[in-house]
Image: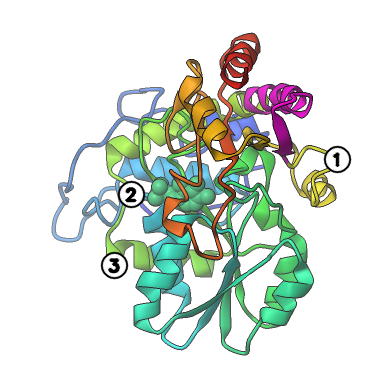
Amino acid sequence: MTSSSGGSGAADHRGFNTRAIHAGQEADATTGAVVVPIYQTSTYKQDGVGGLRSGYEYSRSANPTRTALEECLAALENGARGLAFASGLAAEDAALRTLCAPGDHVLLPNDAYGGTFRLISRVLSRWGVEHTPVAMHDPAAVAAAMRPNTTVVWIETPTNPLLNVIDIAALAEIGHSQQATVVVDNTFASPYLQQPLALGADVVVHSTTKYLGGHSDVVGGALVAADAELGEQLAFHQNAMGAVSGPFDAWLVLRGIKTLGVRMDRHCANAERIVEFLGEHPAVSTVLYPGLPSHPNHEVAARQMTGFGGMVSFRVRAGEEAALKACELTEVFTLGESLGGVESLIEHPHRMTHASVAGSLLEVPADLIRLSVGIEDIDDLLADLTAALA
Ligand SMILES: *Cc1c(COP(=O)(O)O)cnc(C)c1O
């Protein structure tokens, strides 16, 4: 943590967990504090007019706690620049308004995160930005939907809650063939399981509210740019638009990140056991999980992910009422929205997270249940599901 320039610098070749614990987080120069302090300050004393200490001037522009997080994020995604925002949607807004002007066109998945779809279709559309939702697990459909004014190919993989998998490398090639910027929402996989920049993407987006924070105690967002020049443009918009992460929120995300690797290993292991259990359960008609060989995009997932994650969706044979009942009967799985925390969550997308898209192209089946599998003891999770589905 040596300057206010955000997450930038030479490539860090240390292992993932070492970077998670140390990147941007050298011991405090003054006190030796091992953990980056929460710099709860809005402004900084100048040594004479313009005489900034380490470049800090005002905390919207830069704050040392946020700098530490931004450097760590850049190191985890192997990008040139990391930026931390007040929420995932604030990060998305900054990215889209950096990359789009009136008359530009955005391609996005036809099962994109509802908030992303709302931002593009109801906010940016008022500023003359056009969009087309596409079944992005089919690269040919993406190639066919590209227009001369397509400036952004917005990818999200795996998708929520249907867990479709999109081929990042194939779409990066299609997007770049027409000079579009390729953005990947990497929230569901986390940088531990998927490295979009290495697959050719230009920008990674995160809701750090989810796996990066990991403890359901903070709302935050992030951007990581592969290239320093685009990183600089994003940083300009971050400061000009102002939706930055506060120091305490940045600190919580930074603390969460330290255990990301071990948490993801456990999320994946627990999810695999639950997928196996659900696959054999008579009340369950379909299990949606990228790790299943029967998943339509399993081959792509196996190629571009190093694990299949902690999100599992499934459909129950007896229909919507049975799905609602099961959501209300679990005791270890908490009924709630969001995902990616240490505690297991269960929800009914049709009535909860995806209620706003009922009747639209993004509508999800009413017999669908989504699990965010936590890191509790697997026997307790299996017993809980057994009782709820009985
Ligand atoms: C939650 C989420 C977002 C939005 O992030 P917020 O932090 O809630 O603003 C974006 N994309 C995905 C995939 C998400 O799950």
Query: Residue 206, position in %: x, y?
Result: 50, 49
Q: In screen coordinates, is 302 left or right of 19?
A: right
Query: Residue 64, position in %: x, y?
Result: 33, 42
How much space separates mark 1 and mark 3, taking CA atoms? 46 Å
Residue at 85 percent across and 40 percent down: it is: 293
Identify the element where label 3 is drawn: helix
Q: Can residue 1 be seen by looking at this rendering? A: no
Residue at 61 percent across and 77 percent down: it is: 180
Amino acid on which the number 3 mark rests in the picture: Ala
For marks 2 and 3 on the same chain, the one whose residue lies earlier in the sequence: 2
**Residue 267 falls within the magenta-colored stretch:** yes
Q: Quadrant of the C terminus?
A: top right
| Residue designated by label 3 | 240
Q: Can residue 158 be seen by looking at this rendering? A: yes
Q: Is residue 84 above or below residue 255?
A: below
Nearest-to-viewer mark from 1 and 2: 1
**Residue numbers of the magenta segment:** 266-289
Q: How is the image coloured?
A: rainbow
How much space separates mark 2 and mark 3, taking CA atoms? 14 Å
Whether ligand 1 has any atom under 8 Å from the Cβ at mark 1 is answered as no
| Residue designated by label 1 | 293
Query: Considering depth in this image, is 252 or 357 the residue closer to the camera?
Result: 357
Q: Quick one: label 3, few (<14), some, or many (20+) residues within 10 Å?
A: few
- Say the numbered circle drawn on residue 86: 2
